[in-house]
Amino acid sequence: MKRILLYLSTLLLIFILIACTPKKIPTENENSNPNQEETQKEEETPVEPPIAWDKVIQESIELEGMKEPLALNLYEGFNFKTYVPEDFLVESLSSGEGDGYWFYANYENKKVEDVYLHLFFFPETIKEEPSIEDKNSLLYHMLPNMNVIDQTDKVDEWAINEYKNPNGGEYAMLGKHGDRYFTMTLRYPGEYAEGFVPRANKIIDHLYWTDTNEYLVER
C-alpha cells in the first residue's frame, strides 16, 4: 500500500511540474515565413507610376522678357524619347559611322538648313573618349573651329566636355550613355539665337532614356 501511495505521489508531482513550466512564446521572427516577409517588403516598396507620354504637351519659352506659349510633339528615337517644338522638323540617319538625329527649325513650314540641334551617337566600337584635339577622331571632323570650354564654365552637369565656336553660332556637348558616347550640337546664325536656343533646350530637357528609364537632365 505504501508503495502504491509513493507511486501516486510521484506521478502527481510530475504533473504539477509540467503544469508550472512556462511555455516558450515564439518570437515574431520565429513565427514568420521568410517568403512571406519578402512578399510584404515588395508590397511595401512604392512603385513609381509610369510616365504618361502625351502626344502633345503645352509649355512656354521666354522671348524678349515675355512668355510665349509653345506646343511640343512627342518624338521617339531608338533608345530615347523627347518632346520637340511643333515648329521643328526631325530627320534621322543611321550608318556604320553612328546614328544621327537632326532637329531643324521649320519656321512657317520652311526648313532652315543652318539652324538645328544635332544629336549623334558614336558607334559602339569607339571605347576611348572622343577628342577634338585628335585629328584622327571623328569628333575632330564634326566640330571644326571649336574650342573646349573650361570645366568650371560648363553649363550641363551630364556633359563630359563642352565646346564652342569663338565666333559664335555653335555650341556642343559630349556625353556618354551606357557604352556609347554621344554629342549634342546647336548650330545657328546669331539672328536666330533668341528664338532657337530656348526651343532646342526643350528637346534636351525632355530627353528620356527608354533603356534605363531616366532623364538626361537630372530633375
Image (cartoon, helix red, strand yellow):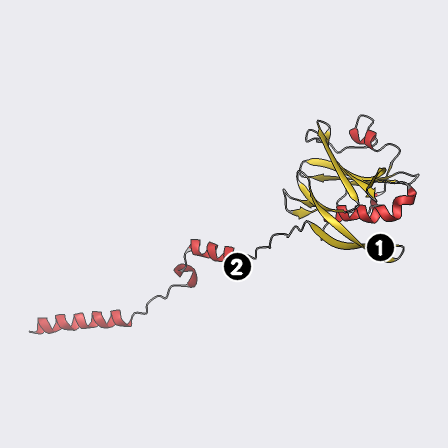
Please provide percent x and percent y for residue 40: 48, 58
Q: Earlier in the sequence, mark 1 or mark 2?
A: 2
Q: Quadrant of residue 96?
A: top right
Name, please, the residue furthest toward the left.
1
Instruction: Say which amino acid is labelled 2.
Output: Glu
Q: Is residue 40 above or below residue 138?
A: below
Question: Label 2 neighbourhood size at 10 Å, few (<14), some (14-19), many (20+)?
Answer: few
How many numbered discs? 2
What residue did someone put label 2 on?
44
Is 25 displayed left or right of 173 in the figure?
A: left
Q: Is residue 96 above or below residue 86?
A: above
Instruction: Say which amino acid is labelled 1.
Output: Glu
Q: Quadrant of residue 148?
A: top right
Q: Residue at x 89, y 33 (%)?
A: 145
Q: Secondary structure at mark 1?
A: strand
Please provide percent x and percent y for residue 180: 69, 35
What residue did someone put label 1 on?
62
Tell me the quarter of the image containing the N terminus.
bottom left
Q: Residue at x 81, y 42 (%)?
A: 109
Q: Secondary structure at mark 2?
A: helix
